[in-house]
Amino acid sequence: MMNNQGRPTNNNAASDAQITGYKSYTGSRGLEQEELLIYEIGDTQRTGVDLPEVEDFKSCLGDVERDQEIGLAGLSEPEAMRHYTRLSRKNYAIDMGLYPLGSCTMKHNPRLNEKMARLPGLGDIHPMQPLSTVQGALDLIDTLAHWLKTLTGMPAVAMSPKAGAHGELCGLMAIRTALEAKGDGRSIVLAPESAHGTNPATAALCGYKVVSIPATSEGRVDLAAMKDAMGPEIAAIMVTNPNTCGLFEREIVEMADAIHAVGGYFYCDGANFNAIVGKVRPGDLGVDAMHINLHKTFSTPHGGGGPGAGPVVLSEALAPYAPIPYVVAGEEEFNMVEHDVEGGESFGRMTAFHGQMGMFVRALSYMMSHGADGLARVAEDSVLNANYVLASLKDVMSASYEGPCMHEALFDDHFLKDTGVSTLDFAKAMIDEGYHPMTMYFPLVVHGAMLVEPTESESKQSVDQFIEMMRHLVKAAKGGEVERFSGAPYNAPLKRLDETGAARNPKLRWED
Amino acid sequence: MRYLPLSADDRAEMLDKIGEKNIDDLFVDVPKYALLKGLVDLPLHMTEMEVEQNFSAFSSRNVAAGDVPFFVGAGAYRHHVPSSVDYQIQRGEFLTAYTPYQPEISQGTLQTLYEFQSQVAQITGMDVANASMYDGSTGCGEAALMARRITRKKRIIVSGNLHPHYIEVVKSATKFADDVVVVNDPAINQAENLLAQVDETTSCVIVQNPDFFGNINDFTALAHALHEQKMLLVVVTTEIVALGAIKSPGEMGADIVVGEGQSIGNGLNYGGPYVGLFATRQKYVRQMPGRLCGETTDAEGKRGFVLTLSTREQHIRREKATSNICTNAGLCTLAFTIHMSLLGEKGYRHLAKLNHAGAVKMADKLRAIDGVEILNATFFNEFTVRLNKDAAAVVEELVDRDIIAGVPVSRLYPDRPELANHLIIAVTETTSEDDMDIMTKELKEVLK
């Protein structure tokens, strides 16, 4: 067994089996510590919070006081710190290494942004306090809106959507409202088969039937098929650009023209805006609405699944239908319009209050840090890193399409044919090498998809190490080392988990 | 630039490997006219110090809740969050992780989600909770849609004492689904006869407890009557601390419980990000929106956790999914869970008692002022008063005296002159007796 410097770790050279052969009594493995649930550690009498005593008083709760024990487990502060610290160490994270999840844009999360979001005048203000006491907050929202409009070349933006899918809903609701205002009751939305699942789910939520458009052999929307599907019933197209194969839709303008020609609207899924930020403005491509995932392109942390933010930029045609509330910059002060104005056409409200302010702060901090010059470099370096991965692996893996790609490189499982190794196995073996796997089995248009998005946060050295690791694994797979893959991961906190069993017999909460 | 590691040499070397001359060759698929020749019209990159200066300027033009006597609630509440919570959620392993789709290297997130679901189910008195929605209001919209899926009926009866923003979100969430949303007028301290409004086409009744105006209700009889007609009761709680003191919606017979969880572990943040709590009965679990985490075992039989029942979700089921939600409130659920673990049963119950005691004390002080009428018969940590003057004007006058006095109901109901003098006042454990006395004294003067 060798360490990183290439020296034997033990001169007396015990065999691997001897070194790893002893199972610990605790189940822990050195720094990898087992951890129970709070309910198995704490109890209902323990607490990690000291609160003032309550003086005697007369209750005004009426006759519905809670009299049964809830069963909440409490921990003292040291126990809680240890519990959550131990759990945290069972997670992979951007801070630990390259996180090549295609379509997710796992870039570095600067800590400056966290600090800014915690300034008392930004973190400790209430959405319902008087507008005269939050002028700085309204200015910040307005400033972020200006950056988003400038970067996208769009005239308006709805700030309140809480995440990408919520932004899609906002865009489609604006589209449907705009059509209905003209007495136009269209029923169909076109979306390519490579679309994110949220696209058809959102369209359905808006009462639309979704018709899927096939991809060409080049991994792009089949424009001819889309044109064939066009007609007076088509309310909108939903196209991701750059698309989920990591390619720029060359015929994007033709698509926009085609939908506009039949009186419909062009919704662009902006999940992959990172590849073109500061380089290309969607407003120049005929887009009517596009959400921007602040948690992707503008680096607000993914936080293990959220929160996100999904502001939606809108064309002149759709802007009047935008949801409330919105900020208006007056001559002397900022105002927030919280109710539709007389004769207004807003489709309504999508959420309580005004959107993900905490994410706005982080995103604007990120944007100001980069500036116009840095943001263009974000796009360039993300595209450069992805193309470098593509160029460095296409001789051993099967690249699904010809380059250049944008911010992510798509491979399929053709190179694993007859090896007995699946895309899933390959991904799990990456875990043993210290990496989070790439996105697997998405997009659906290629077999056994592997979508690699290195992002601009990676140094050349880091990308080189990743490439070297991938080449080793490809060689092992082709060399017949099936067990390296089929049993992987061997070195993670847990072995492969029984997901089928979990779904068949769902256990979704602690019970004594 | 501090966040971008590639040097000019790196870039040249990498372009060479790719076989292109310059970076714009990689953007060859972009229509030529659309590839920007220069930079967009925005400032250039800034140092950390410059960014901090900009944000200090934004921040200093706001009045932070902690700097003044502060009585604002109405759906978001200022509570004290232990320092350890904010430390833990900033650990990179939690902060910079993605959705736990690879369970072998995501057990940290998954186990905390399991703990979160367990806590939410216990607090709400329900069988099962999901791994969060964006916030309470969007969860409320999802509850209305879920009730339709379960009952296959389309008429929704909404209490007039539901938070007005939640009412609006329910309307927009169901807008294009042909649902009929029947919204009652606000009824402060009056019993609503919701049962009289249901008919055979009704899917659910949506109520709030404590309601928007602070009143506490017992919905047990309503739940019972609705169940006899195969309709669902949706109960919303915007102040989750209240459930440490009052009977849970589950005990009252709710079928779906929606909560805003911001009060536990999360700051005010000017309205977001917050954390939507969503719980239901076991029999309805497959109609739930959002992610669910479940227990399972690994290949060696060790306990572990995975995301499960995902055939409900958009990434598998696409247009047939129960919801389009993908990103949720991840890190805010972690903050909730850590804070709740620190509180435990004892701390949570005590916190609730402390909040209620403070509100009772405040109500007693205000009751003694001429021109203030307390409208609530019952309340938890928030109540509604009728002033002898326009409430919004009074709030502005008190801002000049460095007090943020509460939420004028007219901010949410501008078209109801009968509510113009109504003010909603919230008290939490962060409100000191000094704050209460200052508010009482100044309000008295303003109302003279």
Image: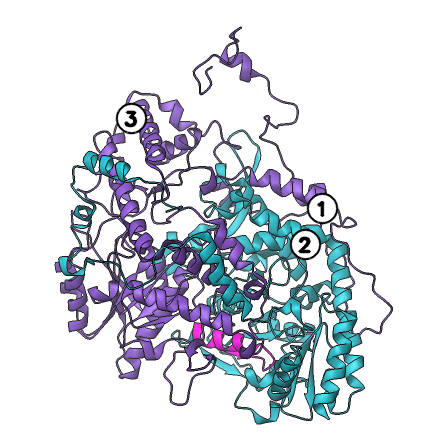
Chain colours: A purple, B cyan
Pick the residue in front: A160 or B439: B439
Q: Which residue is mark 1?
A: A77
The amino acid beneath tag 3 is Thr
Please give the name of the residue rendered at 75% of the width and 87% of the height, measured from the top-left corner.
B444
Q: Amino acid at mark 2?
A: Pro
The quadrant where residue A324 appears: bottom left
For the residues beneath circles 1 and 3, the answer to whether they share a chain is: yes
Task: State which chain disc 1 sits on.
Answer: A
In the image, A412 versus A316, the foreground residue is A316
Camera-nearest residue between B49 and B179: B49
Label 1, label 2: how far apart the Cα atoms are: 9 Å
Q: Quadrant of residue A405?
A: top left
* Residues at circles 1 and 2 in contact by the CB criterion of under 8 Å: yes
> How far is the residue under mark 2 from the one under mark 3?
53 Å
Residue named by callout 2: B82
Helix, strand or loop for disc 2: loop
Q: Is residue B292 above or below residue A432?
A: below
Q: Chain of mark 3?
A: A
